[in-house]
Amino acid sequence: MDTTITFEDFTKIDLRVGTIIAINDFPQARKPAYQLIIDFGSLGIKKTSAQITTLYQPKDLLNRQIVAVVNFPKKQIANFMSECLILGAVQGKDVILLNPENRVSNGSVVG
């Protein structure tokens, strides 16, 4: 990466921990994806689409904690409105989800 940001730029990103409470297949997506419903505690429930089907089955995702950006504007993906962006390490076609080492409260700030 050639772009350097300031600490003030970083503080604009609202990173939170949430728990996946529901998973649905998303056949309308251009690339294989799931629709995820995530509980962010006091921030409420948010939904997103995630291209994580190569490494994760729905049963592996239910009740799993993840890290997400929760202050992006909503984005229309096919017939679905995504409200947050879950974070993962990209390894070729695979995405490995980022999550806290220990269970924390939903909505916990990541900083």
Image (cartoon, grey):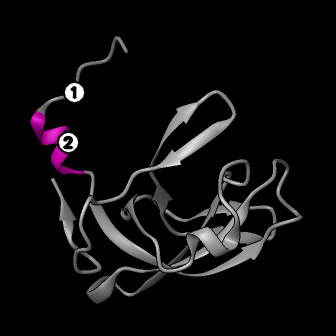
Query: Which residue position holds label 2?
Result: 10
Between 34 and 15, the residue placed more toward the observer is 34
**7, above or below 85, in the image:** above
Query: Which residue position holds label 1?
Result: 5
| Magenta-span inclusion, residue 25 | no
Between 36 and 78, the residue placed more toward the observer is 36
Mark 1 to mark 2: distance in Å? 7 Å
Between 108 and 101, the residue placed more toward the observer is 101
Q: Total of numbered circles in the picture?
A: 2
Amino acid on which disc 1 is placed: Ile
**100, above or below 45, in the image:** above
Say if mark 1 contacts mark 2, CB within 8 Å.
yes
Taking the spot 23% from the left edge, 66% from the top edge, the residue there is 102
x and y percentages locating residue 48 in the rendered image = 59, 67
Q: Which mark is residue 36?
A: none
Secondary structure found at label 1: loop
Taking the spot 28% from the left edge, 60% from the top edge, the residue there is 100
x and y percentages locating residue 46 in the rendered image = 49, 78
In the image: residue 8, left or right of residue 104: left
**60, above or below 106, in the image:** above
| Mark sitting earlier along the chain (1/2) | 1
Residue 72, image quadrant: bottom left
Instruction: For the N terminus, give its image quadrant.
Output: top left
Secondary structure found at label 2: helix
* Magenta range: 7-12
Taking the spot 31% from the left edge, 68% from the top edge, the residue there is 17
